[in-house]
Image (cartoon, rainbow, N blue to C red):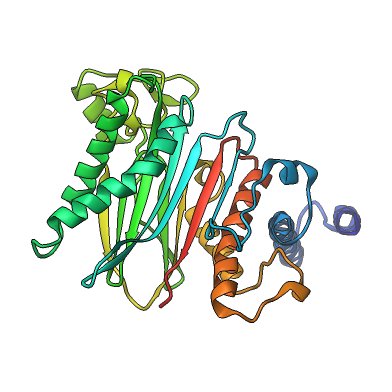
Amino acid sequence: MLINQKENMMINKMDHTIPTSPSLTNCRQTVSYSSKLDHVILARRKRAELRRSKVLSGGENDTLAKRRRFENVDNEFPYQSSVIGRRREMEDAISVELGFVDKSCMKLDFYAVYDGHGGSRVANACRERLFKLLASEIGDGSDQGEMDWDKLMVESFVKMDEEVNDQSEFVGSMGSTAVVAVVGDDEIVVANCGDSRAVLARGGVAVPLSNDHKPDRPDELERIEHSGGRVVNWNGNRVLGVLATSRSIGDRQLKPYVIAKPEVIVNKRNDKDEFMILASDGLWDVISNDFACHVVRRCLDGRICRRSSSEQVNDTTKENKYRMTNAAVVLTELAMARGSKDNISVIVVNLKK
């Protein structure tokens, strides 16, 4: 209110002092005032952003409290947060399998976010089976030298898709997107099928590790139309006016227009790697890659913390686990505060060696 009063006083004063034929001095005054006003507006926006972030560190909003599921660091699900949000049903699923491949020559961790549609069955089936299928594929090909990650991921996703579509209990309109990350000592492998997303923070820069599969993406639109399908704008671009993603596991009724083949990106790790975020589109619909990385960085540095200082612990491993889980929870709550209407699932992986 004080700022508004001051602005009004300045405007009224200028109305009385600026003549009809402005001199050079008056023009300078006008420019000065305009720059000050722009500065005030910018400052207000920053304060509004920080106020939103305070849903982060403290305030207990009743709606958020009812809608969220906060996984405590002492339970068996660290590094992640998954909330039903404003949906009636929870259709997302998360998978964290540390050391899912553990051999003398390699140790790999598996992280995945599945965003179901038409129900949660396909997402839950992927959570239970996909990492096992991938581990089996890796085991079969691990003696053949350097692994062909593109082939391994594609075969695992296709087998998962066949399992789902061959079972009569799954309705033909059920499906799930999948973004999977396999993290080893030397590389990060991301396979994406759908519109969930993986983002890497490297040297202060947000690096996308996947590309969203939207029906209006030029190459996806061409593929769909070439196979005889259509993209219809029905409350957004959708395959046959039904599905808002062009790739998924399941969705038997939309074959061959919707496929389960993932796009695979392999990144060599380096000392600048900070962390990785995997999340469903409930987060990315309202938060940019850059801002998500900014928030997580502050959480991992201890600058955004949802607990009081009296709860600080001296155990470094437990503290790191808490900070990653805290970062995931902060992102889900921030997405809700920004009006996300979908389920929101987030995994944060600390990559600092």
Report the quarter where the N terminus lies. bottom right
Q: Foreground: 314 or 258?
A: 314
Which residue is the extreme one toward the left?
A: 144
Q: Foreground: 123 or 132?
A: 132
Q: Residue at x 83, y 55 (%)?
A: 19
Q: Residue at x 45, y 33 (%)?
A: 116
Specify whether 319 is left or right of 6.
left
Residue 283: horizontal and vertical position, in percent? Answer: 54, 46
- Residue 110 vs 186, above or below: the answer is above
Residue 88: horizontal and vertical position, in percent? Answer: 62, 28
Instruction: Report if residue 224 is visible in the image.
Output: yes
Q: Quadrant location of residue 128?
A: top left
Report the quarter where the C terminus lies. bottom left
- Residue 80 vs 244, above or below: the answer is below
- Residue 78 vs 191, above or below: the answer is below
- Residue 14 vs 223, above or below: the answer is below
Number of marks in the rendered image: 0
Specify whether 239 is left or right of 83.
left
Q: Foreground: 323 or 35?
A: 323
Q: Residue at x 26, y 22 (%)?
A: 255
Which residue is the extreme one toward the bottom?
A: 314
Specify whether 267 is left or right of 306.
left
Q: Residue at x 37, y 35 (%)?
A: 214
Residue 221: horizontal and vertical position, in percent? Answer: 28, 29
Instruction: Report if residue 149 is visible in the image.
Output: no
Q: Foreground: 18 or 179?
A: 179
Q: Quadrant location of residue 122?
A: top left
Residue 119: horizontal and vertical position, in percent? Answer: 48, 27
